[in-house]
Amino acid sequence: MSNISFCDATFYMGCLESERVALIKLKQDFKDPSNHLASWIGDVDCCEWGGFVCNNITGHVLELNLERSELGGKINPALVDLKHLNLLDLSGNDFQGIQIPEYIGSMDNLRYLNLSGDGFAGWIPHQLGNLSNLMHLDLSGSYYELRVEDISWLAGPSLLEHLDTSDVDLIKASDWLLVINSLPSLKVLKLFSCKLHHFAPLASANFSSLNALDLSGNLFGKTSIPSWVFGLSDLVFLDLSSNIFRGPIPDGFKNLTSLRYLDLSYNQFNSTISDCFSNFDDLEYLSLGYNRLQGTISSIGLENLTFIKTLDLSFNELGGKFPISFVRLWNNKFTGSIPISMGTLTSLRSLNLRSNRLSGIIPVPFENCSQLVALDMGENEFVGNIPTWMGERFSRLRILNLRSNKLHGIFPIQICHLSSLQILDVAYNRLSGSLPKCINNFTAMATIGSHHQVKAIYHASFENDYIVEEISLVMKGFMVEYNSILNLVRSIDISMNNFSGEIPMEVTNLKGLQSLNLSHNSFIGKIPENIGNMRSIESLDLSGNQISGKIPQSMSSLSFLNHLNLSDNKLVGKIPSSTQLQSFGASSITGNDLCGAPLSNCTEKNVLVPEDENGNGNEDDDDDGGVDWMLYASTALGFVVGFGCFIGPLLISRRWRYKYGNFLDGLGEGINLAAL
């Protein structure tokens, strides 16, 4: 679909006046804070305006595409005057709880209608059933409540090929399946989180050409997967997750040999893994996590999955030796070493082995998995050095978690080649030596608002790479599990090792880094003077080292800093005055020779610090030990900025409140659970 109109035929007659007037009326009733409709003015040929496509001979408006234009307000009934319109896309706007207009059902030339994520609410009008030419209907993702009581109108658009009513309340539509069965042309059916709880009796499905079926997030807890699903032999995408289906995994899956994406996670399947997946030659994504699967894994059933990119068996009751072909097996009881044959899985994008009992060294043939984006081997018993080839071969890596193993030796400088790295966690090992200066080569951490982000794909279409990761990180002093907001995180954690030497100044070039944990090592020297350059830092932990000197004045400019731990070092002098630094408790800076708020006032003795190696003293310029007027000024400024940039928009904007609420929900879910 194009957002650019064109009208360039030889006999072009220009925009019709009636349709130009209709468009002007639409604009008048829209709220357009971002001025996306700025070109809709004057007597200029309206086919030269942006946002729609005209017939290049008759001048009729054929397509109106205003997706993600930040529009609000209401939809003027003049829309129906665009009588030749066959495509209407208003998705991704915010109409703040208004109802879907009934008169859209009179636009009988429509073939494509997308009102997803628009903030509509209330009952879906049955008049949409009059759109007999409709082939694509998307009403999904409203963050208000859309409801359907009588779904029989949906049988009207009998040519439908794509239907998505995800997040629409269908709890009263008990005959939903029988109505859907009257749509024989369906290719894509998405009914995620519709409160469905019942399958009407159905021997076979008339929509036998279906390619994609998503019934995830519903309430089918007292039933099993219906047999008609296994007759959909053309299925490529099938998501039945989060439904509490019970019992053994049905053998009927062996009929769905065209599948490339299969998600059965978050159910209560309790069998062993049979060989029903053995014929899935094209399967790329398989998730069986969060079930009650038991026993050992039969390689007979999965050995043919040569195109697998992501396989999730996490949170089951599986055991035995580590199998060859799997890529996401965290929180099981696997033992032994990584098999050498793992190196044959050259298409792997995501490998999660966290929280097992794996041991041995990381095998060299594993370097052939050069397409890896996410690698989590934390909480095992791996030994040996961090292989240098990780930095040479894994050029796409964005997540590297080797936390809580028995790795030793120096930190290889080759890891600095991983310019896309966003998360590095090697905490709780036995690593030694200095932290290399080339750490500033992590350019994804050096850029504020970097676009090199890990994809945390949510209900992905099967054309995408399936990189769905969760990772546990120590952020702000607590272990937090990130998933849906993983693409926002930039973190380095090398705590609880034996690193020594000075903290390299180059680390301060990582302006996009949000969390830096160097605690409980043997670092010496001073905190880098230009640490204030790390403008995105939210959590900084340098505790339990031998760092000396004063706290740099530039640290007072770290406006996002909300967790700081400098305790148990050899720091001296007065704590710089700032809104941030004085807000931390005394426990974050104890075990030093510091003074000033939040500690006791400074005296002449503790503002005089030892001479440096050049014989120069470093006296504090302030002659009083209390908090000076700069603290009060910065406190006031912090309140104004905080209210204007954050609290204010939350009070004023419904969209900000909605997005912030979703952020907190995702973070809360991660904390409650316990890593592309």
Image (spheres, helix red, strand yellow):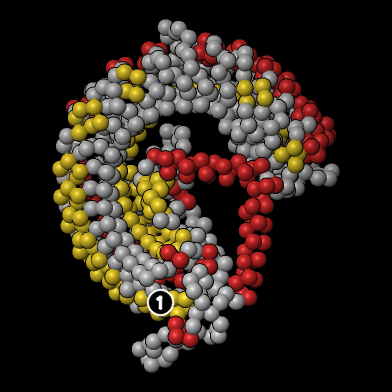
Picture quarter with the C terminus? top left
Horizontal and vertical percent for residue 113? 63, 27
Give the quarter of the figure containing the N terminus: top right
Which residue is more in the foreground, 289 or 254? 289
Looking at the image, residue 606 lies above or below residue 653: below
Q: Amino acid at mark 1?
A: Asp
Residue 303 seen anywhere in this rendered image of the structure: no
Q: Quadrant of residue 325?
A: top left
Left or right of 521 in this view: 532: right
Where, by quadrant of the figure, is residue 261 drawn?
Answer: top left
As drawn, 566 above or below 392 = below
| Residue 509 vs residue 390, the one in the foreground | 509
What residue is drawn where x is 55% and y is 85%?
623
Give residue 564's position: percent from left, percent from top: 45, 63
Circle 1: element type: strand
Left or right: 254 as drawn, with respect to 661: left
How far from the left and from the top, in percent, is residue 565?
41, 64
Residue 328 is left or right of residue 13, and the answer is: left
Which residue is located at x 65 percent, y 34 percent? 119
Say which residue appears at 26% left-offset and 48% top-offset.
379
| Residue at image location 25% in from the left, 37% down from the top | 332
In-front residue for pair 7/593: 593
Q: Nearer the viewer, residue 623 or 244?
A: 623
Crowding near the residue tagged with mark 1, few <14, some 14–19, many ≥20 C-alpha atoms within 10 Å: some
Determine which residue is flagged by label 1.
Answer: 593
- Residue 46: image quadrant is top right
The image shows residue 603, relative to residue 217, as above or below, that is: below
Whether residue 243 can be seen here: yes
Q: Position of residue 353 (x, y in %)?
A: 27, 43
